[in-house]
Image: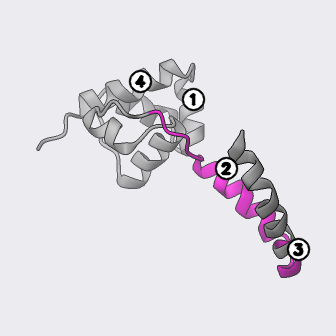
Amino acid sequence: MKLNIKEIGQRVKLLRNQQNLTQEQLAELAGISTHYVYEIEAGLKTMSCPILAAIACSLHTSADYLLFGDHDYDLEVDSPSQHDALAHLTSMLTASQRNQVAHILSVIVPYLKEN
């Protein structure tokens, strides 16, 4: 099966527009340049797996949807920047403090899942 980079770019652009994101905002979320977003959307450039994953996460979709057009694409995913922020916050804590945070999260997470 051959991938059509123009169709992939169209799907990226469609999702970006549906989410009212500019190319600049998507670029910042995905950690790439605005020009690279333009080239992807125009079907001029392909993406590496890490870039594909970053764009998919940034657009709350799956790589399958971007690559193949699968319509089951409304996923709740954390962006890499959210993971980085959590890791950064916890990296500044001692082991004992990280254990306390883990305990607090173990109490809060089940409550959040109910909502």
How crowded is the residue under tag 3: few (<14 C-alpha within 10 Å), some, or many (20+)?
few
Sooner in the amino-acid sequence: mark 2 or mark 1:
1
Q: Nearer the viewer, mark 3 or mark 4?
A: 3
Which residue in the protein does label 1 denote? 24
User: x and y percent of residue 100 in the render?
Assistant: 87, 71
Q: Quadrant of the N terminus?
A: top left
Which residue in the protein does label 4 denote? 13
**Secondary structure under the numbered disc 4 in the rendered image:** helix
Q: Quadrant of the C terminus?
A: top right
Q: Nearer the viewer, mark 2 or mark 1?
A: 2
Q: CA distance from mark 1 to mark 3?
A: 37 Å
Sooner in the amino-acid sequence: mark 2 or mark 3:
2
Which numbered tag is attached to residue 78? none
Residue stretch in magenta: 74-98
User: x and y percent of residue 5 in the render?
Assistant: 24, 34
Question: What amino acid type should be assigned to the residue bearing mark 4?
Answer: Lys
Vertical placement of residue 98 versus 37, above or below = below
User: x and y percent of residue 53 in the render?
Assistant: 44, 49
Q: CA distance from mark 3 to mark 4?
A: 43 Å
Which residue in the protein does label 2 denote? 82
Residue appearing at x 68%, y 47% in the figure: 113
Front residue of 113/89: it is: 113
Question: What amino acid type should be assigned to the residue bearing mark 1?
Answer: Glu
Which residue in the protein does label 3 denote? 97
**Secondary structure under the numbered disc 3 in the rendered image:** helix
Q: CA distance from mark 2 to mark 1?
A: 18 Å
Instruction: Answer whether labels 2 and 1 touch (C-beta < 8 Å).
Output: no
